[in-house]
Image (spheres, rainbow, N blue to C red):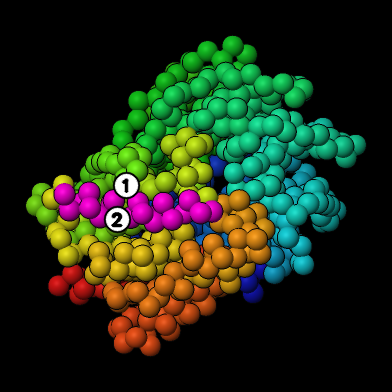
């Protein structure tokens, strides 16, 4: 099946493109999601080097020039190579919606086959170990859960692997079983194995409450897990027959990812402390540390082993966003891509600040400063809420604002991840009022430390950060001159997204906690908002529909506030296309400059 009607034809360039030859682009370039080809000496990765949406690029390890493999209209989110043949699986956006397509094919041709159902939210998981199938997750029509399916490339048919009302994601598989993660509630997750007979076994302790960031099959009996089910911070835990053993635990860091090499001998362990990454390579039998990284300030993301277990590639974001490869034969590290920041100016270094909130709880945040004197400052709240602000910030937008004399501060309020299991629950239900109180503590800290100019502080954020922006202006209207809410909730009672039933422990139940959700909804305090607002949305957003912004904007318009809204017809929950990001960044810069002046 050719999918030219859905995506424009693939393009394989006949000659290499030098990165330096690409037309200058004010958008922050990224190189992400590396994957090894079966030859073990080449990688593909996703990049916006060509100036459009994220496309697939190829390069040989140690050589400078890459080749662009695809030229789709839509963004590529994830790729996985079949270790048995020259065949790749891609997860591709569709019309900017949260729906995505899983396609497979040979990247040197223009023919791809769609294997996931249409009109569903599907996500690529991995190839099966024999290379004959693709495992993907999707939410079937009229069902609440996101379940696992396997597509057989020989028969062209999919079979269902799991069935539940929960959110499920494959962690690992072999010829005998599937190891998968199940989200019961946002702070309560399960780890299960389904064997070849169809029997499901819960392997995480029933009394263990926490989150699982990664799990893998170590052998026929042991499962290795990055989890905080048995500790306050995410630790390396070995589970065998419903018994657990803590292998490595760090008091000040979280284990956020693990990856066992294909031959089963090496274990990659990624740790984060205040969003700064480090990693180890361990022996899987003794768990001795064979290599310890020495990374600069920044955050490591997706990693991948070569099929012969010699090389490990990973994405690292500091002032740039690039792919690196580690040769585990001698532990020599090489930089494989050269994506650049969005301007020719020297990137602004972020500094970590720690301070206390109203109840003496320690908070922290990353500051990108335009001047060593007090300056107009925008507070940018991260999404989640179980995420964290990182050293790199937002890249392209930061540079534009800094050049305009505006500081950007990225706080981690209570409820953020990376600060222990207790900290991440401090905003649950009625405690969300405390998270909103953190906003005032942040504002006061910025003024007291002479970072921000009094009377020239703004708030902004995306997703949950958009909700916090709405709440900041409703609960502390006198503190901020404006707010920019990007796909943020304004009414917790009416925003019934497809995964709301998994969030009652975090936000509250819409029936039993109706009064609480009413009070926490910024739209019900909109009469207090006095600052003009800019709203940003993707028209195809199914997580936070556009109505969440238009409702609040309508209330504020009726008060005479001069608000604005920017709706991208070809985006969903997030603005990812380069052209749209250029427009968005300029709009944000111009909006803030106008209201700070």
Q: Is residue 116 above or below residue 529?
A: above
Left or right, 34 with respect to 396, comes to right
Q: Which mark is residue 358?
A: 1
Q: Dot 2 surroundings within 10 Å: few (below 14), some, or many (20 or more)?
A: some
The residue at which mark 2 appears reads as 440
Is residue 130 found inside the magenta-colored segment of the image? no
Q: Quadrant of the C terminus?
A: bottom left
Q: Which one is closest to the eye, mark 1 or mark 2? A: 1
Residue 384 visible, this angle:
no
Callouts 1 and 2 close, C-beta under 8 Å:
yes
Residue nearest the viewer, comparing 110 with 145: 145
> If you read the primary sequence from the N terminus, does the residue marked by circle 1 or circle 2 appear first?
1
Residue nearest the viewer, comparing 287 with 408: 408
Q: Residue at x 55, y 27 (%)?
A: 231
Residue 314, percent from left and from top: 47, 37
Residue 330 position by quadrant: top left
Q: CA distance from mark 1 to mark 2?
A: 8 Å
Q: Residue at x 41, y 52 (%)?
A: 435
């Amino acid at each position: 099946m050719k999918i030219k009607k859905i995506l424009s034809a693939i393009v394989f360039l006949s000659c290499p493109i030098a990165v330096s030859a690409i037309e200058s682009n004010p958008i922050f370039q990224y190189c992400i999601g590396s994957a090894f080809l079966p030859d073990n000496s080449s990688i593909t990765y996703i990049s916006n080097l060509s100036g459009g949406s994220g496309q697939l690029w190829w390069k040989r390890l140690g050589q400078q020039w890459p080749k662009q493999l695809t030229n789709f209209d839509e963004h590529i989110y994830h790729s996985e190579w079949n270790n048995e043949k020259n065949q790749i699986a891609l997860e591709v956006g569709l019309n900017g919606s949260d729906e995505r397509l899983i396609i497979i094919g040979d990247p040197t041709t223009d023919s791809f086959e769609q294997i996931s159902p249409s009109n569903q939210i599907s996500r690529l998981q991995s190839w099966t170990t024999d290379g004959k199938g693709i495992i993907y997750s999707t939410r079937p029509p009229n069902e609440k859960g996101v379940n696992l399916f396997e597509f057989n490339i020989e028969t062209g048919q999919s079979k269902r692997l799991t069935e539940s009302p929960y959110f499920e994601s494959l962690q690992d598989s072999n010829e005998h079983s599937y190891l998968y993660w199940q989200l019961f509630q946002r702070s309560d997750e399960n780890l299960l194995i389904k064997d070849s007979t169809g029997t499901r076994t819960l392997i995480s302790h029933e009394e263990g409450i926490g989150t699982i960031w990664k799990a893998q099959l170590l052998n026929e009996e042991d499962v290795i897990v990055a989890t905080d089910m048995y500790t306050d911070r995410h630790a390396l835990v070995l589970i065998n027959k419903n018994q657990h053993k803590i292998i490595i635990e760090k008091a000040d860091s979280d284990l956020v990812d693990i990856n066992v090499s294909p031959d089963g001998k090496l274990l990659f362990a990624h740790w984060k402390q205040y969003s700064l990454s480090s990693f180890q390579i361990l022996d899987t039998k003794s768990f001795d540390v064979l290599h310890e990284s020495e990374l600069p300030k920044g955050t490591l993301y997706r990693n991948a082993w070569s099929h012969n277990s010699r090389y490990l590639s990973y994405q690292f974001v500091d002032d740039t966003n690039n792919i690196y490869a580690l040769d585990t034969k001698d532990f020599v590290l090489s930089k494989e891509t050269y994506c650049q920041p969005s301007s020719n100016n020297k990137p602004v270094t972020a500094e970590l600040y720690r301070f206390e909130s109203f109840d003496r709880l320690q908070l922290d945040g990353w500051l990108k400063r335009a001047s060593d004197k007090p300056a107009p400052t925008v507070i940018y709240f991260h999404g989640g809420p179980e995420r964290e602000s990182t050293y790199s910030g937002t890249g392209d937008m930061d540079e534009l604002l800094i050049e305009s004399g505006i500081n950007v501060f990225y706080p981690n309020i209570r409820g953020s991840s990376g600060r222990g299991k207790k900290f991440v629950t401090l905003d649950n239900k009625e405690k969300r009022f405390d998270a909103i109180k953190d906003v005032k503590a942040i504002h006061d800290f910025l003024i007291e430390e002479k970072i921000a100019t009094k009377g020239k502080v703004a708030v902004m954020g995306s997703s949950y950060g958009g909700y916090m922006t709405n709440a900041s202006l409703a609960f502390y209207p006198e503190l901020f001159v404006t707010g920019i809410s990007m796909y943020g909730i304004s009414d917790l009672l009416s925003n019934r997204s497809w995964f709301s039933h998994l969030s009652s422990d975090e936000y509250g139940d819409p029936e039993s906690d109706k009064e609480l959700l009413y009070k926490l909804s910024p739209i019900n305090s909109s009469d207090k908002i006095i600052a003009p607002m800019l709203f940003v949305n993707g028209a195809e957003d199914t997580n936070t529909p556009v109505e969440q912004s238009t409702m609040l904007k309508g209330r504020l318009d009726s008060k005479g506030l001069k608000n604005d809204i920017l709706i991208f017809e070809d985006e969903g929950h997030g603005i990812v296309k380069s052209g749209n990001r250029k427009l968005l960044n300029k709009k944000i810069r111009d909006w803030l400059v106008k209201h700070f002046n």
